[in-house]
Image (cartoon, rainbow, N blue to C red):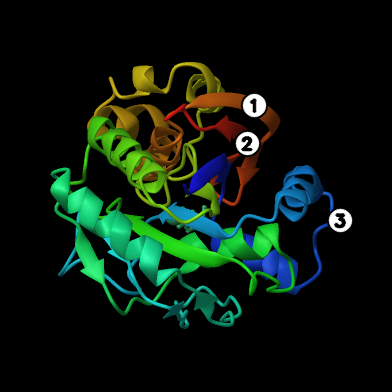
Amino acid sequence: MANIIGGITTSHIPAIANAMANGLEETPYWKPFFDGYPPVRDWLNEKKPDVIILFYNDHGLEFFIDKKPTFAIGVADEYHNADEGWGIPTIPPVTGESELSWHIANSLVEDGFDMTICQEMKVDHGLTVPLNLMWPGYNYGHVKVIPVCINCEQHPMPQPKRTFALGQAIGRAVASFDEDLNVVVFGTGGMSHQLDGERAGIINRKFDIECLDKLVTDPEDLTKYSNLDLVEIAGAQGVELNMLLAMRGTLIGQVKELHRNYHAPISNTGSGLMLLEHTMPEK
Ligand code: DHB
Ligand code: FE
């Protein structure tokens, strides 16, 4: 049986890639952010997951606002990145896990989630920044990655209730895959943030920390929010919380918090790094 051994929340902002490319990790601005990561890297290096299922939102590289799948999943053997205009280095190809991807895609459609299934897919900073953060120097070649993309750019967007349910359905799909694979799920994105408009730069620390607490103890409670609630409470891009919620949905067994680092602001966002250990339910 494939086994989800943990879940991780992390920021994905492009400025992180620039800070890493320019060796700024120890500067006063970045240190409190990067200091959170070694325990998570150590855990990943110890556990050596075979597969990462990675929830992110595509900010316009593969899906522009003219065509926006609500939910998309990659089923390719390899994914490429391209210049997105943030000045960040383009990263080497990411290895896919086609067999498990197809299993999850089939299972999701059976389960009522009408996924866009991508046999080719360019992946943007939402996916590449977290991978390089966990395995600096682009040393992620040994892990296979399944991208799952959630629309957080163009209304109408899937509601928190639905993204949490998507995560749960992926958790069940993984549990029904026969091969013995260890899987870790990443939920990437900002917590509170807004990139433009009158409220640009808004950060709601109290809400972010409450969300991190709830993601551990009572994630279902977060599904009471609508996306418009999130926009109001946590900024226009606060809807990226949906990715963290989808990740938590996949953890259908027992969860234990192993590590956390909240830091704000980093660029325009609140950054919530959290490592959750997961034990699958008994069959
Ligand atoms: C920033 C935040 C994002 O979520 C993103 O996708 C790009 C940039 C920022 O705060 O700079
Ligand atoms: Fe983003």
Residue 235 in percent (x, y) is at: 38, 37
Which callout, 1 or 2, points at the residue further toward the start of the chain? 1
The disc placed on residue 257 is 1
Would you name the residue on which mark 2 appears?
A: 274
Amino acid found under the numbered disc labelled 3 = Glu
Relative side of 93 to 155, left or right: right
Q: CA distance from mark 1 to mark 2?
A: 7 Å
SS of the residue under disc 1 = strand
Q: Residues within 10 Å of mark 1 (few under 14, many from 20)?
A: some
Would you name the residue on which mark 3 appears?
A: 26
User: Can residue 154 be seen from the camera position used here?
Assistant: no
- Looking at the image, is mark 1 or mark 3 nearer the viewer? 1
Does the residue at mark 1 contact the one at mark 2 (Cβ under 8 Å)?
yes
Quarter assignment of residue 79: bottom left
Label total for image: 3
SS of the residue under disc 3 = loop
Quarter assignment of residue 112: top left
Residue 27 in percent (x, y) is at: 84, 55
Which callout, 1 or 3, points at the residue further toward the start of the chain? 3
Q: Residues within 10 Å of mark 3 (few under 14, many from 20)?
A: few
Compared to residue 121, the image places residue 109 above or below, namely: above
| 168, 179: nearer the viewer | 179
- Looking at the image, is mark 1 or mark 2 nearer the viewer? 1
SS of the residue under disc 2 = strand
Amino acid found under the numbered disc labelled 2 = Met
| 269, 50: nearer the viewer | 50
Q: Residues within 10 Å of mark 2 (few under 14, many from 20)?
A: many
Relative side of 26 to 232, left or right: right
Compared to residue 26, the image places residue 80 above or below, namely: below
Relative side of 229 to 254, left or right: left
